[in-house]
Amino acid sequence: MFFSEPNFQLMLLTTLPTFVDETQDFFNAFCQSLSSPTFHHKAIETTVEFINLWMTSYPEDWNAANVRKLKDACYISTLTPAQQLLFHSFRILLSKSPLGHNGTVSTPTSDREEKNKEKEKDTHKIKSKITLDEIRSEDLAKQITLMDFQAWKECHPRDALRWIKSKNRPLDVPKIIHFIESRFNGLTTWVSTQVVMRHKVRERAKIVRKLINIATKCHMHKNYNATMAIVSGLQAIPIHRLSHTWSIVFEKEKIKSRFDALLAFVTREGNFPNLRAAHAKATPPTIPYLGIILQDLLYADEGAKNLDSHNYINIQKRRRLFQTTQLITQFTVTGYNFAPNEPVQEYLQKFERYDEEWLFQRSNLIEPRARLTFLFSLPS
């Protein structure tokens, strides 16, 4: 039976928001099914495993009321022998779990977080006011990656699934929205801003080369979010149109080769084939490009009905949604072993954000559009 498979149980719990309006409704129906006289003793072990998995994977579902409801069910006097054995196992499970006390779990500080705190004490000592020109490309790539991962590890498979259903995303999935706005859109805007703020063409070309090198370093660190964001910033219309700047950038053949490789890597033609291949073979630590994950979830949700031909939950659809979210699960656990550099991170955070209209106006100011001159010959 499907339910006895651990992966099936985790799939069911992860995709819960896609087939029930409220987790509470599912919990109530689940408890009701356990109290049914038809409950069979063969289901005891699987049910206990399911409850244990639910408690450990999604403790947020277990509010005080739900814990109390399960405790109360353990002491119903009309239980069958199978149910008595089942609820005895529940009592043992609750006594060992932090949820058994008040229905909430405090999240312990991980060893990685403790190590990062220690590293912060040994942060590189550089002057507080720095500019892009003074920071090495490798250092920038590492700090961008650390900042990306801090936001990435807060994203959750259920958040991504709620994103495809939500009508108020900033309220319903703030961590997903924060990652998109801060760590992708913000980085893209930063890239474009750095270029157009340079009035001299050779200074712009120098900055573009540096940004290409940073994107290459991010790609080497398997930070595909930043790789895509930086290339997107360089391909934005206000930057792409700077033909004089690009002609100087590509005077160095090595830089042109690097940029061509980046463009090939992030190409959308054929539905991101190279990015998908990188995701498929990547090992942690990695930061995927979230846009692909959300796109695939949206297509999977809209491409199949919630119920199958027998009016049951469409398990194949849930499997596809669950498999897509595993890119999030796989890469949010193991972080990067880079030392935080607070001055560099502060520099990256405290840049002024400009909208696309301003960037385009600035682009036209530094490289005005060529005027067309028409010569007319007057008739004699």
Image (spheres, rainbow, N blue to C red):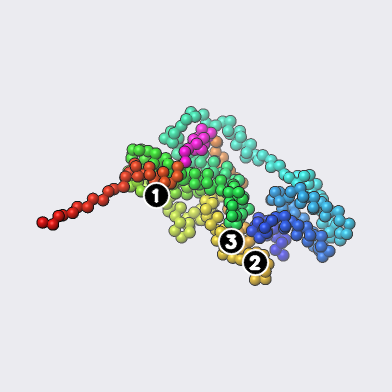
At x 43% / y 53%, what residue is drawn?
Answer: 264
Magenta residues (range): 341-353
> Mark 2 and mark 1: span between their CA atoms?
44 Å
Say which amino acid is labelled 1: Ile
Give how far across and how far down residue 148 sits, in percent: 54, 43
Spatial distance from mark 1 to mark 3, Cα to Cα? 33 Å
Which circle marks residue 273 in the picture? none
Q: Amino acid at mark 3?
A: Asp
Task: Give me the residue at 72% from left, 44% from top.
Answer: 105
Question: In this view, which residue lies farthest toward the bottom?
Answer: 309
Gap in angstroms between the C-alphas marked 3 and 2: 12 Å
Residue pointed to by mark 3: 301
Q: What element does badge 2 sit on?
A: loop
Residue 283 lies left or right of residue 269; in this view the side is right
Residue 343 counted in the magenta span:
yes
Image quadrant occupied by the N terminus = bottom right
Q: Which mark is residue 237?
A: 1
Query: Label 2 neighbourhood size at 10 Å, few (<14), some (14-19), many (20+)?
Result: few
SS type, badge 3: helix
Give the residue number, with chain letter if any, for mark 2: 307
Q: Is residue 246 above or below residue 118?
A: below
Q: Is residue 85 visible?
A: yes
